Amino acid sequence: MILEGYLSYKLTGLSKKELKDIKKTFLERYAKVEFTSIDIDEILSLLKYDKKNSHGNINFVLLESIGKSIIDVKISNEMYLEAFAYYKE
């Protein structure tokens, strides 16, 4: 959810405040997960099997604001890596 929050901030208009609220809320409730570069590569390779995908494209549901979603947003590999970097901060 934190990574999707970051992608939403960068791509679909989620505000910086809402992004910070999402990150804070999740990290208060759940332990932070550590990812190696191998883990990230494996996660990205598994994304292609998600049910929201079509025609070889990986599609995400992102937020314009909390409670307002946008479906079928395509994400570049660069953005995936940026989102993981944001999570690690």
Image (spheres, rainbow, N blue to C red):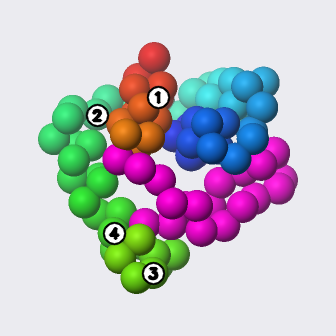
Q: Earlier in the sequence, mark 4 or mark 3?
A: 4
Q: Main secondary structure of the magenta part?
A: strand
Q: Residues within 10 Å of mark 2 (few under 14, many from 20)?
A: some
Q: Secondary structure at mark 2?
A: loop
Left or right placement of residue 39 versus residue 30 in this view: left
Tell me whether the residue at label 2 lies in contact with that at label 1, contact meaning CB atoms closer than 8 angstroms: yes
Of residue 44 and residue 10, the one placed in the foreground of this image is 10
Q: Earlier in the sequence, mark 2 or mark 3?
A: 2
Q: Residues within 10 Å of mark 4 (few under 14, many from 20)?
A: some
Amino acid carrying mark 3 in the image: Ser
Amino acid carrying mark 2 in the image: Phe
Dot label at residue 87: 1
Q: Secondary structure at mark 3?
A: loop
Quadrant of the snapshot with the N terminus: top right
Quadrant of the snapshot with the C terminus: top left
Region of the chain picked out in magenta, as a range:
58-77
Of residue 53 and residue 39, the one placed in the foreground of this image is 53
Question: Could you say where residue 4 lies in the image, as x and y percent from the top left?
Answer: 56, 46
Q: Earlier in the sequence, mark 3 or mark 1?
A: 3
Amino acid carrying mark 1 in the image: Tyr
Q: Secondary structure at mark 1?
A: helix
Q: Residues within 10 Å of mark 3 (few under 14, many from 20)?
A: few
Q: Which residue is farthest bottom?
A: 55
Residue at numbered disc 2: 35
Question: Could you say where residue 67 lies in the image, as x and y percent from the top left?
Answer: 83, 53
Residue at numbered disc 3: 54
Question: Could you say where residue 77 lies in the image, as x and y percent from the top left?
Answer: 35, 47
Residue at numbered disc 4: 48
Is-magenta flag for residue 41?
no
Give above or below for 25 relative to 5.
Answer: above
